[in-house]
Image (tube, rainbow, N blue to C red):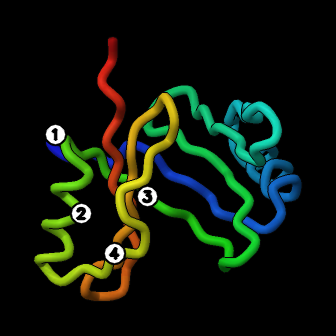
Amino acid sequence: MANPFVHVELMTKDLKKAKEFYGRLFDWKLEDAPAPMEYTMIRPGEGTGGGMIVVPDAPPNWLAYVGVDDVAASTKKAKDLGATIKKDKTEVAGMGWFSIIEDPTGAILALWQPQPRK
């Protein structure tokens, strides 16, 4: 399938409370990222994984990421089609690149380009 959903991320003000809730609700393996980053990987066992991150200046929400071959080109195409760019191409060191767009209806979506495997 082209352009699958590849990652979902919970943006929250209270990571401890979120981990406690989702850890008890679902059979997910939760792995904290090394300090100083406040990030927890969600490993569901099968299907699309995700993460949880502290974002103190935004309302709590889930963000879906769609896989693309070229995040810069896909972000430009989204803009040409009427999207608002909320966050332009940004690197996640050693992992890949993402951008965040708002579609013409107001829905938020992230685009993800993984770093090539060596």
Q: Work out which quarter of the rendered image holds the N terminus and state it.
A: top left
Read off the residue under disc 1.
1
Are there few (<14), some (14-19), or many (20+) residues within 10 Å of tag 2?
Answer: many
Q: Amino acid at mark 4?
A: Ile
Badge nearest the viewer, 1 or 3: 3
Residue at 40% x, 37% y: name it. 96
Q: Are marks 1 and 4 in contact (CB under 8 Å)?
A: no
Nearer-the-camera pick, 101 or 107:
101
Q: Earlier in the sequence, mark 1 or mark 4?
A: 1
Q: Are marks 4 and 2 in contact (CB under 8 Å)?
A: yes
91 is higher (above) or lower (below) than 110: above
Circle 2: element type: helix
Q: Earlier in the sequence, mark 4 or mark 3?
A: 3
Q: Earlier in the sequence, mark 2 or mark 3?
A: 3
Nearer-the-camera pick, 92 or 27:
92
Query: In the displayed structure, does residue 106 sit left or right of residue 18?
Result: left
Read off the residue under disc 4.
85
Q: Amino acid at mark 2?
A: Thr
